[in-house]
Amino acid sequence: MAKITFEKPGNFIYPVPAVMVSLKDNTGKMNIITIAWTGTICSDPPMAYISVRRERASYAMLKETGEFVINLPDEPLVKALDYCGVRTGAKTDKWKDMGLTPGKSSVISAPTIEEAPVSIECRVKDVIPLGSHDMFLAEVVAVQVDEKYLDEKGAFHMDQVGLVAYSHGDYMSLGKKLGSFGYSVRKKPATKKAGKLAVKRKIASKRKEDR
C-alpha cells in the first residue's frame, strides 16, 4: 500500500455523528444548531461534548444557560438537519421554517425536538477554548427516546432508528452491519451439522475402545 503525506494536516476522522442541538436563552428564545463535532467522552458519569464557533448565534445561548439537547436525527430529518446548519437563528426561525416541534425536557429548560427519535439532555460542566471552536463539555442528565423503538422488555433498538452520519460534506445513511462488539474474540456456537458430526465421532471412538 502506497501512502502520501499532506503538507497541511487536517481532520480526517470521518464519518462523524450529525446532530441537531436545541437550546433556549433566558428570555425564552429558542434555536437549533447543526453540529458535527460531537461525541461521547465519558461513561460514568455519562458525558458528551459539542464544539461550537464563537460567531454562531447559539454560542451566546450556550454560555448564558449552560444547557442544550443533542437530538439524533433519522433520515426523514436530513433536510432540516442541513437547513439548521446553513441558516442562522439570528435571522430566521428554524423551528417554523422546518415545521419542527419544541418538546419539553425532563430535567433542563432547553427544548427537545419532538420529531427526533432520540433527545439527550445535557448540562455544561466546562468550556474549553480551542481555536476555531470552543468545546462545551457536558454531563448527560436525561435521555428521551421514541417508544416505538422499544421492545416488550424495554430495550431500545438503536439499529432500527435509521440514523445518519456526516462525511466530507455529505450526509449518509449507515451501512450494513459488519460485526458486533467483541465478535473478533467470541467463540462461534457449534452448528447443528457440526454437533451431529461430533456425536458420530464420539460413537466411533467408543466402538473402537470396546473392541
Image (spheres, grey):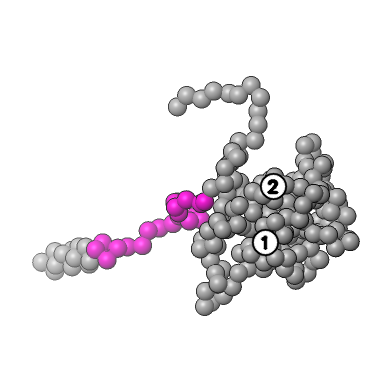
Q: Is residue 24 left or right of residue 4?
A: right
Q: Is residue 178 magenta?
A: yes
Location of residue 188 with respect to 82 vertically, above or below: below
Q: Is residue 27 left or right of residue 75?
A: right
Who is closer to the viewer here, 183 or 174?
174
Q: Which residues are magenta?
A: 173-195
Q: Is residue 92 left or right of residue 200?
A: right
Who is closer to the viewer here, 85 or 208?
85
Who is closer to the viewer here, 119 or 102?
102
Instruction: Find residue 152 and report its horizontal and vertical position in percent.
Output: 52, 78
What residue would you read off at disc 1? Answer: 99
Inspect the image, locate mark 1, and give the three-letter code of the amino acid beneath it.
Gly
Q: Is residue 194 magenta?
A: yes
What residue would you read off at disc 2? Answer: 85
- Quarter of the image that includes the N terminus: top left
Inspect the image, locate mark 2, and give the three-letter code of the amino acid beneath it.
Gly
Instruction: Find residue 134 and report its horizontal and vertical position in percent.
Output: 79, 43
Q: Earlier in the sequence, mark 2 or mark 1?
A: 2
What type of secondary structure mainly makes up the magenta span? loop
- Quarter of the image that includes the C terminus: bottom left
Q: Is residue 157 visible?
A: yes
Residue 192: image quadrant is: bottom left
Q: Residue at x 79, y 45 (%)?
A: 56
Location of residue 124 with respect to 86 vertically, above or below: below
The mark found on residue 124 in the picture is: none
Instruction: Find residue 153 and report its horizontal and vertical position in percent.
Output: 53, 77
Location of residue 59 with respect to 99 vertically, above or below: above
Describe the element under mark 2 as helix, strand or loop.
helix
Q: Residue at x 82, y 42 (%)?
A: 54
